[in-house]
Image: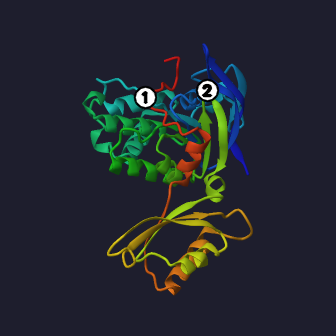
């Protein structure tokens, strides 16, 4: 597997706080790679070092085979959306972004074409001649994403790209990231674990500056995926034993039941999968469970995946929510 970002032994200290401690991992080409961790875990610090905004105390970062200490060699190939991107409030959007492209060596016509295309991707083309100060917080966030997507970057770093956006705008950005995956490798930091599980194929989890987990989302969640199964009636003991005997089912536990005398009402179960052995796949286990349930004359009402990535995150970070901690102590 080809890797386009290689982080080796990365360390950074701010006074008495160890923001990063010998962090090392690689990012596969054309992946959407999620960077997770509580506030203060080191996510923004790591992004800042990759983009050469900060200097590491130890370790190296290579992007597309280039040591980022020679960041000028990556001009046009590496792009970043900082967590708190800033723009000139009294300058029109189009003028600001065109200026950035002129600095990158584009002609004025090329710059304008790229900017209009990028603004269109994030739904801001009709606002091109407005001043940034007239935009809402969500629009400014989309403007930062438009800037990160300018040109043809091969690696894009997005620090909290959907924070502060309404659900429709956040969905638009996620869809856009997926569309860009065929031509770029995208690293995304976020506190939204459900969003990361939907969006990313690989993740790294930081905690207090340490790398505590890294791998594909499938590998990380493979051993104990959780599903909620809602049935039209509770299962009898023999039916529970039948479901439990299906290869790949680790446990099945009733969460709740409702209805007249419970015996005829609905029931919801938590099914835990263990897919680590043999040729057992998620689809084969689901088919076996549904087939067995239907054979019993019970109609499934809901079969929804649980947030198993969240379960792993809370486990490896000690259940931290991360609220109230500053990400970068130097700020």
Q: Secondary structure at mark 1?
A: loop
Q: Residue at x 58, y 38 (%)?
A: 318
Horizontal placement of 270 versus 139: left or right? right
The circle drawn on residue 49 is 2
183, above or below 17, in the image: below
Q: Tell me if residue 185 can be seen.
A: no
Label whose residue precedes the other's in the sequence (1 or 2): 2
For this orientation, the residue located farthest to the top is: 15
114, above or below 100, in the image: below
Q: Residue at x 48, y 40 (%)?
A: 191
The picture quadrant where one finds residue 251 is bottom right
Q: Residue at x 51, y 26 (%)?
A: 327
Q: Residue at x 62, y 74 (%)?
A: 284
Horizontal and vertical percent position of residue 155: 59, 41
Q: Secondary structure at mark 2?
A: helix
For this orientation, the residue located farthest to the front is: 261
276, above or below 132, in the image: below
Q: Nearer the viewer, residue 51 or 72?
A: 51
- At label 2, counting other C-alpha atoms closer than 10 Å, the crowd grade (few under 14, some 14-19, many 20 or more) is some
Q: How many numbered badges does the structure rendering display? A: 2
Q: Nearer the viewer, residue 30 or 288?
A: 288
The circle drawn on residue 309 is none
Horizontal and vertical percent position of residue 274: 65, 63
Horizontal placement of 161 versus 20: left or right? left
- At label 1, counting other C-alpha atoms closer than 10 Å, the crowd grade (few under 14, some 14-19, many 20 or more) is few
Horizontal and vertical percent position of residue 197: 53, 52
Horizontal placement of 127 versus 16: left or right? left
- The residue beneath circle 1 is 84
Horizontal and vertical percent position of residue 286: 56, 73
Is there CB contact under 8 Å for labels 1 and 2? no
Question: What's the distance in space between the residues labelled 1 and 2, CA to CA?
Answer: 16 Å
């Amino acid at each position: 597997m080809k890797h386009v970002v290689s982080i080796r032994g990365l360390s950074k200290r701010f006074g008495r706080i160890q923001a990063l401690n010998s962090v090392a991992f690689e990012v596969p080409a054309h992946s959407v790679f999620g960077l997770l961790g509580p506030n203060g875990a080191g996510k923004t610090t790591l992004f800042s070092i990759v983009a050469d905004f900060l200097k590491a105390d130890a370790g190296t970062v290579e992007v597309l085979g280039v040591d980022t200490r020679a960041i000028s060699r990556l001009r046009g190939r590496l792009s970043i959306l900082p967590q708190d991107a800033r723009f000139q409030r009294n300058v029109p959007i189009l003028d600001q972004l065109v200026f950035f492209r002129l600095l990158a060596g584009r002609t004025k016509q090329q710059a304008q074409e790229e900017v209009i295309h990028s603004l269109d991707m994030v739904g801001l083309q009709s606002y091109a001649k407005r001043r940034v100060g007239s935009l809402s917080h969500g629009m400014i966030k989309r403007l930062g994403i438009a800037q990160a997507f300018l040109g043809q970057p091969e690696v894009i770093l997005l620090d909290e790209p959907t924070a502060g956006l309404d659900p429709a705008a956040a969905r638009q950005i996620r869809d856009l990231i997926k569309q860009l995956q065929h031509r770029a490798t995208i690293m995304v930091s976020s506190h939204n674990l459900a969003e990361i599980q939907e969006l990313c194929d690989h993740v790294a989890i930081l905690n207090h500056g340490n790398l505590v987990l890294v791998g594909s989302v499938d590998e990380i969640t493979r051993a104990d995926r959780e599903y909620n199964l809602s049935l039209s009636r509770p299962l009898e003991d023999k039916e529970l034993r039948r479901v439990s005997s299906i290869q790949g089912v680790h446990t099945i536990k009733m969460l709740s039941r409702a209805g007249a005398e419970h015996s005829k009402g609905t029931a919801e179960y938590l099914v835990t999968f263990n897919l680590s052995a043999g040729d057992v796949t998620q689809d084969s286990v689901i088919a076996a469970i549904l087939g067995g349930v239907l054979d019993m004359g019970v109609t499934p009402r809901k079969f929804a995946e649980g947030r198993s990535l969240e379960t792993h995150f809370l486990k490896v970070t000690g259940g931290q929510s991360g609220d109230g901690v500053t990400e970068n102590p130097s700020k």
